[in-house]
């Protein structure tokens, strides 16, 4: 076999990958089938959150994360989509109907800042980035259904955000309140956290304060307990993804007590503590500034003024720790839960940060932050005896309770590049929502953001309007929706055929297509996506209860989820600022898309950070090149040209090696398919490499050593093993495996050894 090596064509990744990608695009190879009524009856929704039955075909929607239109694809994208694409190709190979598509998350501050830096309008910046990123993703060979992609900043798409806003508003899940924002007094504008550098504004470098101002808020608190309870049903979520939900949830178990006002008859305050065995050591009660009954505890003008100053006047952004965050002494007290003492009542945003909009017992002996607050209040601290809770027969009986750190949050921003909020303000009618028929309310294209102030608030052509109810003069809302709100629905549009996307949203959400594909069988996203996933779960439950997604009885958008860690280099996050970025385009040009994809899968499990090194690329490229030569040498000799082993002397027999090879094939197939099914692509790729090594070193080499050449039966066994290897490799290195399968097709067919795809499916 070695003598023919010099005559073999080299592994030309550029030619192979380009030709196959052009063919895939020409043949529209990765279109998802239309489901129709039959698909709706057999699809994902009918199976609930359990794995779908083994009957084929299944309806598998693999949700890829929606990238920001930030300019270029980075290595984190490559890792994420390599995992999802391998799973999509595996599912197609086993006979499933597969939907693998995504949209660009194109609203928000990153796009606005990128446009400002480039000196172009955000819409032009987004179009440029989306085109550039699409080209990069196609060059990497990802099998996305591109017909179903979308850009969230297109008016036809952001009407989804406006419709969702109105739907949730009608159900009381969106409300007007106040929220803390980073504010630059010099620029007179709110800032995002990424625009605050060491407490100073990114534009003018002046100090930034925290300011309470009117906001639109999303009431996730209405569904937080159900999100908590449903987590136990998420059997297809791997542990990192489940852990992210627990982290966002911030569940705190403890007790609560009803504490009578020490001065006013009939007034009680319910206070929580996670330290139920230390009630006697309570020193004070702290209330969140967002407590729903706070006004009852603002007893005089001094306290009311201090609270108003806290809400509207702002405080230094650096004042976020327990020694600096504002405390307001209400001058009131409640009865202590144990004994006859009294506990002072204070107001502080520290409660929000730790427990949500509630009231809590301050127990300095058990909590360092409480100790700092008690020190600031100059309180005498009661003694704490280990295990001493409320004595039996106490007048104030504690009861088991739960609190969550997850809380309602602001969804409006004082910036240009976002979805216009479909609200007008009328002196006669008050706050008036638009009707669904008036959507989309479009963003004025002629405005150019500069990073200072809010362009919509200074554009009479936008904000001056007529009231939809009385037709009198009115003013539009000039805040826009935060891009996090857009993400609440970004998992749905891929399920909608493009020709149906102009329908009213109520009709879209009733399509059979959605019943077939939803819930998504797998979500693959980065480790920073926990908040998005949590809030998407919240909104799905709200849409279920509104009747629009009633078929999702559990209210879960994702039956399964995998979260992967980031790609780092030299122990640090990749950043242009640090100069440690690896450009995917350069690696694709140098070694090919398949090598790069294999490298990011081989280097680490999804749940571990991938510390990028050139050795991973070198190792995977060497593996492909060696397998290329090895396969072509094997294909060069049809079995019919070789002498049979029948009748050879026993000392030359190799049937025991062929039996071993057969067992290795069965073992490799079982392990690789099982790992791929669980999205453990790191394990699958390493098993593939181990399988290739066994074929070459533990079968072929001993056969050659034993008698110097192959017999017909040996060659047939070798070709069968290679056929299986390439079949199993295809989801991970699709261009390479497809090319080699085509090159070996003739000899495999001649030997009647074409890969048995049904056998692969059976073992899946």
Image (cartoon, grey):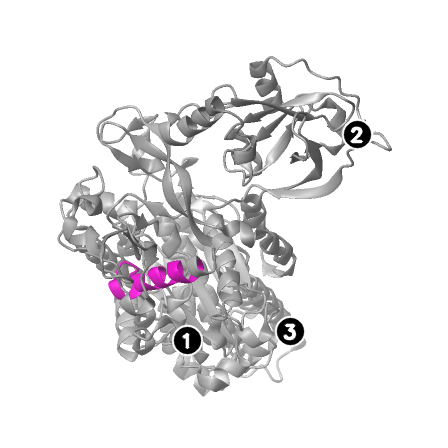
569 relative to 752, above or below: above
Residue in the picture at 37% in, 44% down: 215
* Residue 496: percent from left, percent from top: 38, 73
Disc 2/disc 3 C-alpha distance (Å): 70 Å
Residue in the picture at 14% in, 53% down: 461
Q: Residue furthest right?
A: 392
> Is residue 166 within the magenta segment?
yes
Choose the circle earlier in sequence order: 3 or 1: 1
Nearest to the eye among marks 2 and 3: give it.
2
Q: Quadrant of the C terminus?
A: bottom right
Magenta segment, which residues? Answer: 151-168
Choose the circle earlier in sequence order: 2 or 3: 2
Asked whether residue 62 is in view, the answer is yes
Q: Quadrant of the N terminus?
A: bottom left
**Would you name the residue on which mark 2 appears?**
389
* Residue 394: percent from left, percent from top: 82, 31
**Would you name the residue on which mark 3 appears?**
659
**Would you name the residue on which mark 1 appears?**
635
Mark 3 surroundings: few (<14), some (14-19) or many (≥20) residues within 10 A: few
Q: Secondary structure at mark 3?
A: helix
Mark 1 surroundings: few (<14), some (14-19) or many (≥20) residues within 10 A: many
């Amino acid at each position: 076999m070695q003598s023919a090596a010099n005559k073999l064509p080299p592994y030309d990744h550029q030619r192979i990958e380009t030709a196959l990608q052009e063919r895939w695009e020409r043949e529209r190879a990765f279109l998802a089938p239309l489901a129709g009524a039959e698909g709706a009856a057999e699809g994902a929704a009918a199976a609930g959150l359990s794995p779908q039955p083994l009957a084929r075909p299944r309806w598998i929607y693999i949700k890829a994360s929606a990238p920001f239109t930030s300019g270029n694809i980075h290595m984190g994208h490559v890792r994420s989509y390599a995992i999802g694409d391998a799973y999509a190709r595996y599912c197609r190979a086993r006979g499933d109907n597969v939907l693998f598509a995504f949209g660009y998350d194109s609203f928000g501050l990153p796009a606005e800042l990128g446009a400002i830096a480039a000196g172009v309008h955000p819409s032009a910046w987004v179009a440029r980035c989306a085109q550039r990123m699409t080209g990069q993703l196609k060059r990497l060979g990802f099998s996305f259904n591109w017909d179903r992609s979308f850009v969230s900043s297109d008016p036809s798409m952001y009407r989804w955000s406006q419709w969702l806003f109105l739907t949730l508003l009608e159900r009381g899940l969106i409300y007007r309140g106040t929220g803390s924002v980073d504010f630059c007094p010099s620029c007179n504008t709110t800032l995002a956290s990424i625009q605050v550098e060491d407490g100073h504004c990114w534009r003018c470098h002046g100090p930034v304060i925290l300011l309470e101002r009117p906001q639109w808020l999303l009431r996730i608190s209405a569904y937080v307990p159900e999100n908590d309870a449903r987590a136990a049903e998420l059997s297809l979520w791997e542990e990192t993804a489940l852990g992210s939900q627990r982290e966002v949830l911030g569940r705190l178990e403890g007790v609560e007590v009803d504490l009578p006002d020490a001065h006013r008859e009939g007034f009680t305050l319910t206070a929580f503590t996670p330290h139920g065995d230390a009630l006697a050591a309570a020193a004070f009660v702290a209330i969140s500034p967002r407590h729903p009954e706070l006004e009852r505890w603002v007893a005089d003008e001094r306290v009311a003024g201090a609270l108003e100053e806290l809400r509207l006047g702002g405080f230094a952004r650096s004042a976020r720790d327990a020694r600096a965050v504002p405390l307001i002494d209400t001058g009131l007290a409640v009865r202590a839960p144990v004994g006859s003492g009294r506990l002072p009542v204070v107001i502080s945003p520290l409660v929000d940060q730790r427990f949500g909009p509630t009231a809590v017992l301050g127990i300095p002996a058990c909590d360092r932050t409480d100790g700092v607050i008690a020190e600031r209040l100059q309180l005498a601290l009661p003694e704490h005896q280990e295990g001493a809770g409320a004595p039996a027969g106490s007048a104030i009986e504690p009861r088991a309770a739960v609190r969550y750190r997850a809380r309602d949050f602001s969804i409006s921003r004082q910036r240009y590049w976002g979805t216009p909020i479909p609200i007008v303000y009328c002196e006669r009618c008050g706050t008036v929502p638009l009707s669904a028929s008036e959507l989309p309310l479009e963003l004025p294209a002629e405005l150019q953001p500069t990073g200072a102030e809010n362009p919509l608030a200074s554009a009479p052509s936008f904000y001056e309007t007529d009231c939809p109810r009385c037709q009198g003069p009115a003013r539009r809302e000039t805040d826009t929706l935060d891009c996090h709100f857009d993400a609440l629905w970004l998992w749905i549009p891929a399920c909608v055929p493009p020709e149906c996307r102009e329908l009213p949203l109520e009709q879209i959400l009733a399509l059979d297509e959605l019943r077939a594909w939803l819930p998504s069988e797998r979500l693959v996203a980065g480790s920073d996506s926990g908040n998005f996933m949590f809030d998407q779960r919240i909104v799905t439950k709200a849409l279920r209860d509104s009747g629009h997604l009633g078929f999702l009885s559990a209210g879960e958008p994702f039956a399964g989820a995998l979260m992967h860690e980031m790609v780092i280099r030299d122990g640090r996050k990749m950043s242009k600022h640090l100069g440690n970025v690896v450009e995917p385009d350069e690696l694709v040009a140098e070694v090919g898309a398949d090598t790069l994809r294999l490298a990011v899968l081989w280097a680490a499990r999804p749940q571990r950070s991938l510390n990028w090194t050139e050795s991973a690329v070198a190792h995977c490229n060497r593996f492909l090149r060696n397998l290329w030569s090895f396969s072509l040498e094997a294909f060069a000799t049809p079995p019919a040209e070789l002498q049979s082993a029948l009748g050879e002397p026993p000392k030359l027999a190799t049937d025991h090696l062929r039996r071993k090879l057969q067992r290795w094939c069965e073992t490799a197939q079982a392990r690789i398919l099982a790992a791929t099914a669980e999205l453990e692509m790191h394990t699958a790729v390493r098993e593939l490499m181990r399988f290739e090594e066994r074929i070459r070193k533990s079968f072929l080499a001993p056969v050659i050593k034993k008698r110097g050449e192959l017999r017909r039966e040996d060659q047939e066994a070798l070709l069968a093993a290679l056929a299986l290897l390439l079949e199993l490799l295809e989801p991970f290195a699709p261009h390479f495996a497809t090319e080699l399968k085509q090159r070996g097709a003739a000899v495999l067919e001649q030997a009647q050894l074409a890969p048995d795809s049904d056998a692969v499916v059976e073992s899946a």
